[in-house]
Amino acid sequence: NTVGVYMFALAAAASTAAPLESVDGAAFFEPFSSDWESRWLVSKDADFQGTWIHEAYTEPEGTPGDKGLMVGNEAKKHAVSHLFKEPIDPKGTGLVVQYELHMKKDLKCGGAYLKLLTASEELDHDGFKAETPYTIMFGPDKCGGTNKVHFILRHKSPATGEWEEKHLKKAPTPLLAVGETHLYTAIVGADNTVTLLIDNEEKVKASLLESDDFTPPVNPPKEIDDPDDKKPDDWVDTAKIDDPEASKPDDWDEEAPRLIEDPAAERPDTWEPDEPLQIPDPTAEAPADWDADEDGEWEAPLVPNPKCKPSGCGEWKRPQVANPAYKGKWVQAKIDNPAYVGKWAPRQIDNPAYYYDAAPHDVMPIGGVGIELWTMQDGILFDNILVATDPRVAEEAAERTFSARKAAAARLERGDGWLGAASFYLSLAAEYARENALPVGVAVCAVLASIVLLCCCRAPARAAEAGGGGVEGEEGEEEEGEGEEDDGEEDGEEAGEGDEAAEEAAEAAEEEKPAASTSTARRRTRKATD
């Protein structure tokens, strides 16, 4: 029974090791299980020759058996996509995109971002193409002087119908250490805010309506510079000029040094001008194995001269002080320019492309998710991609995936041998039981019921065995008692007569107790003989 309970606990722990398969409330969730190829399509376009690998995380892994989708080749373009059955419309609700990123190699030049594809006729069921339109691009990008987490909104002008990329200005720095897993979350709120989180920690919060948060701004300015306006040739925009009446004074010495020797300083009486700053260490001795013929003449190491401690040794020099005659380079004074007109700027005209989008969060419906990269390194692993309209859904998913993985991995690293592993799997079992209370409760009840039933069935058998032994014991006691009476009656008789009486008593007992066991009869006979 103990073994059965133990095996059940191991089974429960093993079941928690399975990756999360779905998330309630998510419009889309991809854990990249073993059948991922049935949902994702690798691009067949000639520009994308890179392969994708279904790969496990770097050990120690907090969720054993979990795998993600990894870039498989260096210096190649990679593309893979999944198209939704029904587009996701963020109007009035906003949008959340979240995914885990695990680096198996040092990323020196390449991207590790996602693209939310625009629902349109241009989406190709044969896979990602270079011209495949996207609505949001989000994730790390590192190469040369670039090292940031992109957030790019592809916005359509209601005035001209043209598409324009709006880049978040204050992009955070990504976390891309080898062997680490990090969580990237972008939240586009119905209030037109954009919040970027890394590992559930807010890094940037911006507004789609603020002109200083995106470049170019989502909403263009009402007025722009007149491209036909030019600055007049006689326009004076120099506010200050040299004073023509100013001249350098005759006593102004530009060559005078800033510092001079202090004429009032005197050498201290304790100064030792003839003593060196360092002397051979008088306490040092040549090593015992020093051979002057082979190693040369031995010299003691130098140490500070103790005679220099009070004031100093060697040549004494006066300290430097500020030169009262120093004035520096003479500069002609400035005065207001009487011809100054002001700073010239082109006149403003109405912006023909002006519009005001009061709800830029209401982007075009999302038709799918794509990963399209050109990277010099492989080993970039994506996992647990989530698209939702409620940030709480992403937060709950993160707790069950990223946070649980991180905590479990930390327990494994802190654990000591089998004790750490046991603690880890027991914690997994507890977590599984908490999340699956009903099936676990049924399984536990079934095991307990089996144990109780087994105990109840064995109880009558044990009672019967115990009852049989009691009868035999009573018979044995009676027989031993009779033997003791025989011993008392025959006490003092001769040895030959005692043996004969013992044999007769044994025969009588056999006749009276035919059901007695052979062993009991032997004990009775032996007792009577004694």
Image (tube, helix red, strand yellow):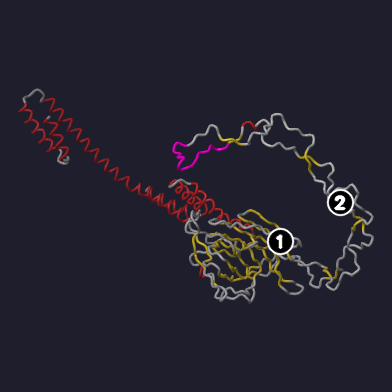
Residue on which the image places disc 2: 330
Q: Position of residue 17 (x, y in %)?
A: 48, 56
Q: Does the magenta stretch include residue 292?
A: yes
As drawn, the residue found furthest toward the top would be: 492
Q: Disc number at residue 23?
A: none
Q: Main structural element of the magenta stretch: helix, strand or loop?
A: loop
Asked if residue 530 is positioned above or below residue 472 in the image, the reply reads above
Give the side of residue 512 with respect to residue 415, left or right. Answer: left
Asked if residue 121 is positioned above or below residue 439 in the image, the reply reads below
- In the rendered structure, which segment of residues is drawn in magenta? 287-302
Q: Where is residue 213 in the image (x, y as percent from the top left)?
A: 73, 61
The local crowd at label 2, few if under 14, some if 14 to 19, many if 20 or more residues have their Cα within 10 Å, is: few
Q: What element carries label 2?
A: loop
Give the side of residue 258 with respect to residue 73, left or right. Answer: right
Name the foreground residue: 368 vs 70. Answer: 70
Q: Can residue 82 be seen in this view?
A: yes
Name the foreground residue: 115 vs 455. Answer: 115
Residue on which the image places disc 1: 169
Quarter holding residue 137:
bottom right
Give the side of residue 281 with respect to residue 224, left or right. Answer: left
Q: Is mark 1 on a helix, strand or loop?
A: loop
Whole-angstrom CA distance, mark 1 to mark 2, is: 45 Å
Asked if residue 317 is positioned above or below residue 393 in the image, the reply reads above
Q: What residue type is labelled 1?
A: Lys
Residue at 71% across, 61% down: 169
